[in-house]
């Protein structure tokens, strides 16, 4: 959907290379007739209005030089991806080829905290550890460059392998096999972390992040993303998630903070993980009503978890019965993706 002849020409060549067919609509009224039956919907950077009551477009397509405005437009329109042409031509051709395939790839599960110190990183580590224990191919992603480095919680800061700064130049289509072979492993799952150093985080462009997550989806059965809580990190990662789980302590203040955070969420399926002991003052239904999301599980309140995080012993806690029960309940909610260790 575009009225730009330049964009139309660029996309026509890419679609031909992907072996697909293309319909072009110059406005929302014309596009509405083809929208729901298309395998993928691309909208140009000149588009400001979508047909009413239609699913979100797959990709916002723009030209080199339009920069961050494309990502802002994608957020407004609810688009899943951004393609900056001509650099992203190979990625877009590959994306279109896969959009016509019956295999959509693995599940991307985002974890964020409803308030500071909620325990999102802890929950993400335990869920990834449990899924790997079932035999699934799992990648644990550190989405917070200001979090101090997920690798510290795994006691894996010395393990060789790529970290986010090494992937800052990624663009187009990233080979999923090469990515998997280049990442370190801890607790049975691969992980991609920010370095645990005092240096300022290296800026990783949004296009590089999208390319890496796209390769992760193709290479793993489950990708668990520890998103962080900032609006910037939610904008970077949450749009690529199939589902987002919000960890909320069983406290009124935490519930209020979580409700505010939801305003930054994209239109993605979301649910709560309530952290607390059974019989807490605020139970699951009350938290659910206050936040406006269903409860999908309860994160166990265990002594010394914070100390274990500091000491890099979080994976040891993941073997405890209460933790295994929690993680299993979350994985069960994912349905067939985790049944019997995934489809692979």
Image (cartoon, rainbow, N blue to C red):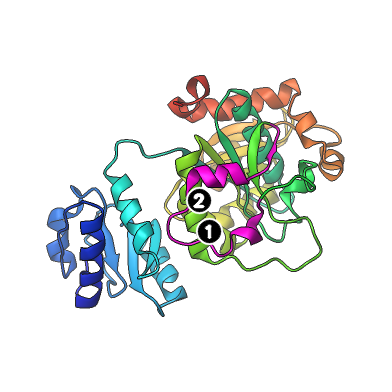
Q: How far across and how far down the image is residue 200, in percent?
A: 74, 69
Q: Is residue 229 visible?
A: no
* Nearer-the-camera pick, 302 or 121: 121
Q: Secondary structure at mark 2?
A: helix
At horizontal 39% and vertical 63% (from top left) the residue drawn is 82
Q: Give above or below for 220 relative to 265.
A: above
In this view, the residue farthest toward the bottom is: 65
Give, as a single range, the part of the protein colored magenta.
162-187
Q: Which mark is residue 171?
A: none
Q: Quadrant of the N terminus?
A: bottom left
Cβ atoms at labels 2 and 1 below 8 Å apart:
yes
Q: CA distance from mark 2 to mark 1?
A: 6 Å
**Residue 167 magenta:** yes
At horizontal 24% and vertical 48% (from top left) the residue drawn is 39
Q: Is residue 99 visible?
A: yes
Disc 1 packing (10 Å; few <14; some 14–19; many ≥20): many
Disc 2 packing (10 Å; few <14; some 14–19; many ≥20): many
Q: How far across and how far down the image is residue 64, in percent?
A: 39, 76
**Residue 108 magenta:** no
Q: How far across and how far down the image is residue 326, in percent?
A: 65, 27
Location of residue 35 (image quadrant): bottom left
Q: Give above or below for 294 relative to 133.
A: below
**On the rendered structure, is 190 left or right of 102?**
right
At horizontal 76% and vertical 44% (from top left) the residue drawn is 159
Residue identifier under label 1: 209
Q: Give above or below for 210 relative to 5.
A: above
Residue identifier under label 2: 213
């Amino acid at each position: 959907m575009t009225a730009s002849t330049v964009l139309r020409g660029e996309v026509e060549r890419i679609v031909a290379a992907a072996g697909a067919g293309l319909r072009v609509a110059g406005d929302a009224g014309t596009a509405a007739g083809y929208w729901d039956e298309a395998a993928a919907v691309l909208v140009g950077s000149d588009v400001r209005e979508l047909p009413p009551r239609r699913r979100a477009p797959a990709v916002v397509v723009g030209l080199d030089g339009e920069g961050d405005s494309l990502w802002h437009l994608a957020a407004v329109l609810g688009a899943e991806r951004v393609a900056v042409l001509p650099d992203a031509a190979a990625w877009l051709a590959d994306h279109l080829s896969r959009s016509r395939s019956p295999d959509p790839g693995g599940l991307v599960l985002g974890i964020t905290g409803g308030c500071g110190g909620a325990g999102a990183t802890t929950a993400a580590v335990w869920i990834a550890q449990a899924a790997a224990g079932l035999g699934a191919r799992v990648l644990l992603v550190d989405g917070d460059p200001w979090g101090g480095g997920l690798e510290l919680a795994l006691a894996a800061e010395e393990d060789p392998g790529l970290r986010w700064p090494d992937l800052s130049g990624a663009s187009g289509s990233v080979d999923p096999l090469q990515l998997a072979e280049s990442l370190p492993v801890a607790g049975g799952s691969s992980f991609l972390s920010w370095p645990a150093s005092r240096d300022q985080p290296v800026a990783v462009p949004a296009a590089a992040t999208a390319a890496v997550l796209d390769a992760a989806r193709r290479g793993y059965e489950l990708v668990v993303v520890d998103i962080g809580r900032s609006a910037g990190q939610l904008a970077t990662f949450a749009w690529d998630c199939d589902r987002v789980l919000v960890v909320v302590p069983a406290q009124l203040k935490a519930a209020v903070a979580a409700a505010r955070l939801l305003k930054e969420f994209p239109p993605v399926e979301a649910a709560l993980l309530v952290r607390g002991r059974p019989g807490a003052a605020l139970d699951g239904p009350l938290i659910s009503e206050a936040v406006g999301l269903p409860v999908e599980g309860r994160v166990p309140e265990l002594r010394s978890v914070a100390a274990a995080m500091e000491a890099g012993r979080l994976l040891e806690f993941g073997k405890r019965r209460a933790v295994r029960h929690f993680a299993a309940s979350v994985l069960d909610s994912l349905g067939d993706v985790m049944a019997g260790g995934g489809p692979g």
